[in-house]
Image (cartoon, rainbow, N blue to C red):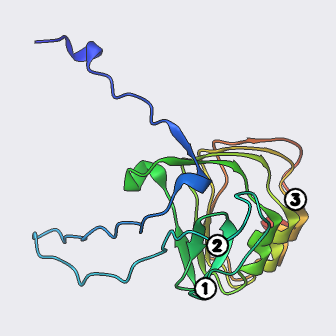
Amino acid sequence: PAPLAALATPEPTPMPVSALTTPLPTPAPVGAAGTPFPTPAPVAVLTPIPTSSPTAPFTLAPTGCSCIWPNLCGCLGNRFDYDSERNGQPRLEGSIPTTIGLWTSLTYLNLNANALSGTLPTEIGRLTNLVSLSLYGNRLRGTIPTEIGQLTKLFQQIWLDSNQFSGKIPTELGLL
């Protein structure tokens, strides 16, 4: 047998968002007594976007899903959960596009433990229905935009740690 120290788990390989084309799995939660909870509705669906270019700007897929990255669409309107650490999915890489501001009906946004880089776009402030924002464990940098103070319903959680943000925490964030 190999020594315990030699059994390290390999780091997941980042995958470009454009390669994603399958539905996200929905785990079957189990209660403390081993009884299954009711199966929740799927959180998001990854579907291909019919465009002539893989880097085309924001598009609406034929199913009416709004898309923030090519091939990455949230079809249920109010939740988007892509935590590669928890779901065992390939990590998303690249920057969060400004078109994220078009998902105004989102109440829950989780992009934890991915390989996202660049700055947090000011358009995040348009997601005024968010009650939970989790972006920890990425490579986001720059300052936290003051527009985050427009997220007045953000009462469940906000996780921005384990990134590379710099500068002062916006006063607006402390007023939430």
Q: What residue is disc 2 on?
A: 50
| Left or right of 87 in this view: 173 | right
Residue 43 in the figure: left or right of residue 119: left
Instruction: Return the residue nearer the eye: 32 or 45.
Output: 45
Query: What is the crowding at mark 3: few (fewer than 14 residues within 10 Å), some, or many (at least 20)?
Result: some
Quick one: SS at disc 1?
Answer: loop
What residue is shown at x 51% (from left), y 61% (from top)?
82
Kind of residue sitting beneath label 1: Pro
The amino acid type of the residue labelled 3 equals: Pro
Image spot of residue 105 (x, y percent): 67, 87
Instruction: Kindly tell me whether residue 156 is visible in this rendering.
Output: no
Residue 45 pos. (x, y %): 48, 73
Instruction: In the rendered structure, find residue 70 and report the number of the disc placed on it.
Output: none
Q: CA distance from mark 2 to mark 3?
A: 39 Å
**Residue 170 badge:** 3
Q: Position of residue 75 (x, y in %)?
A: 54, 82
- Amino acid of disc 2: Pro
Instruction: Using residue 147 as the reference point, say whether residue 83 is left or right of it.
Output: left
Q: Nearer the viewer, mark 2 or mark 3?
A: 2
Q: Are marks 2 and 3 in contact (CB under 8 Å)?
A: no
Give the alpha-carbon distance from disc 3 to disc 1, as whole Å: 39 Å
- Classify mark 2: residues with Cα within 10 Å, few (<14), some (14-19) or many (20+): some
Picture quadrant where residue 135 is located: bottom right
Quadrant for residue 117, please give it: top right
Q: Residue at x 80, y 67 (%)?
A: 57
* Label located before the other in sequence (1 or 2): 2
The vertical placement of 108 against 56, above or below, is below
Q: Which mark is residue 62?
A: 1
To which quarter of the image does residue 58 belong?
bottom right
